[in-house]
Structures are given as structure tokens and as C-alpha cells.
Image (cartoon, rainbow, N blue to C red):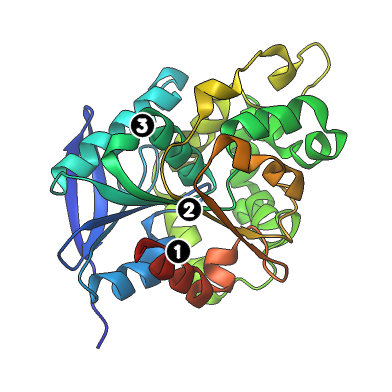
Amino acid sequence: MTLEPEHVTLEANGVRLHCARAGAGPLLLFLHGFPESWRCWRRQLEHFGARGRLAAAPDLRGYGLSDKPAGEAAYRARVLVEDVRQLAAALGGGRFALVGHDWGGAIAWAFAVAHPELLTHLVIVNSPHPYLFWRELASSPAQQAASQYMLLLRSAGAERLLSEDGHRRLWEMVSGDWGGTALGEEHRRSLRDAWAEPGALAGGLAYYRASPLYPPSPGDPGAAGLRLDPADFAVRVPTLVVWGERDRALLPGCLDGLDRCVPDLEVVRVPDASHWIVHEQPGLVTREIERFIAR
């Protein structure tokens, strides 16, 4: 029997966040990435909600049915981390397990650095640790080349460009540039729905514009202009990283040395999956999460 998620709107950090949730029990919170919505976690909500967990997935601020405040300052890391803290409290409080993919993973990493006392487990799916991503963007020509799309997404005309021809460039990213060649029709419909929400493109792009981590361009050193200390990015939470190795945007070098930043770490590499492993192999992702949080 399929457990249909319940949809609620919750106040958190001054914004209203649309959230899908299923089940009851210890909280398992899922965060999506660009350019998606809560729907990318639908299978996991149904699975864990039927197995003694409160499984919940919001539309992040700027996406879907959630509020879309204007301005880059509304999408800084500390703001997004506070969204998660207050959302988790609104869902029942206490310690919880956190799962994130892509930008949702970036928020999850930052949350684990800032609030390890609130987490039982951290699960990251194809999202680089911030210190290692900075290192790769600053020093790896291969990762710099793979991340050139970020410069387009940060540009002033990105909303117009991405909306042209039925969002053609976005489709090329998710079905070609990022390696996701096996997207099903349900996934495509969910993406179309998410992109069609008023202000959603600007909201999603604000994450890129607010971040200091991007590749160099003429006259702008990008991430190389920063100086970061790995001690400031230590993660003291049991952590699982699931990584589709055919990810064309985030290269395997993003995993090198991760254990020095995350002492309690397990990495599961999936050679035949891309950046879109959540959609390509949802059963594998669910099984790995279930196994890990049972520790």
C-alpha cells in the first residue's frame, strides 16, 4: 500500500516553506537540489514514512510552493542553515537524520558543521564537502572546466536564457551535461511543474549568485580568491556519502581527502550512476540510507 505524503506549509526563519511529509516517528529530513523540488524524494518519503519514521521534504526557499524572497542575501549559507533548524523544530524537534542532494547536500554539510548536536546521521548524495569543493575549484583545471555552467547560472540574464525554448538549456543540463540520460516521464513532469512556479527560476539561481564558491573567470579569481581553514569545516556527525561516479558536473576529485574533514565517514561509489542517482537508482539510494541510519 502506497503512503501518500501530506502537504503542509510551515513557518521557518521568516518564510513559509511548503513541506511534504509522511509517517510518524523520528524525523528523517530530505533536502533537494537545483533545479528540483520536494518531489525528488517522493519514493523515500513513501518508504520511510511506512516504516516508523516521520519522513519530510520541503521545497527549499526560492523553489516550488515555498516563499521566494528577493536578493542574494536571503540565500546565504547561514540563512539556509537556519531554515533547516527551524523547520526541523516545527516538525517536532529533537535530534534527527538529514539527507541532501546537490544544493540540498551543500546545506546539509553546512548544517552538520554548525549544529552537530542536532543530528544523529548525515547522508549526502552527489554534493561536495565545502572545503574540498573550494580546493577543487581553486586548483583543479578539470573541476574548473566542469563547473563553467555556474558562471552562466550566476549571470544577470540567466532567467531569460533558461526559460527560452521551453527551458531547453535546463533540459540539456539535467539530461546531458550532468549525465542524467535516464530521466523518466514522472521526473520530467515534476521538473516542469517546479520551473513553472512564479519566481522559481530566480530563486534557484540565487543560490549560485549568493555563494562564494564558483570557478574563475577573466578578472575574477572565484573560489581561488578565498582562504579557508579545513578546521572550520570539520563534520562531527556519522556521515554516509553516496556518489554516482558518472556525474559530469562534480568530479571524483571532490571526494579525495574527505575522511580528513569527516572522521566518521562511509563512502558508497556507484560507477553506473550520474548526478541524478536519486532518480536513476532510487532503490539503491533508499537501501543505503536505511542501512546507514539503522547504525
Disc 3 on helix, strand or loop?
helix
Q: Are marks 3 and 2 in contact (CB under 8 Å)?
A: no
Q: Are marks 1 and 2 in contact (CB under 8 Å)?
A: yes
Asked whether residue 17 is in view, the answer is yes
Q: Pointer 1: residues within 10 angstroms few (<14), some, or many (20+)?
A: some
Residue 259 x/y as whole percent:
61, 42
Mark 3: amino acid: Val
Residue 40 x/y as whole percent:
44, 62
Mark 2: amino acid: Glu
Q: Residue at x 72, y 28 (%)?
A: 135
Q: Pointer 3: residues within 10 angstroms few (<14), some, or many (20+)?
A: many
Mark 1: amino acid: Ser
Q: Earlier in the sequence, mark 1 or mark 2?
A: 2
| Residue position marked by numbered label 2 in the rendering | 36
Q: Nearer the viewer, residue 279 or 263?
A: 263
| Residue position marked by numbered label 3 in the rendering | 81
| Residue position marked by numbered label 1 in the rendering | 190
Q: Nearer the viewer, residue 3 or 218?
A: 3
Q: In the rendered image, which quarter contains the C terminus?
A: bottom left
How far apart marks 3 and 2 lie (CA) works out to 19 Å
Give the residue at the far right of this rendering.
141
Q: Is residue 24 above or below residue 32?
A: below
Residue 48 x/y as whole percent:
29, 70
Q: Tell me: 175 left or right of 114.
A: right
How far apart marks 3 and 1 lie (CA) works out to 25 Å
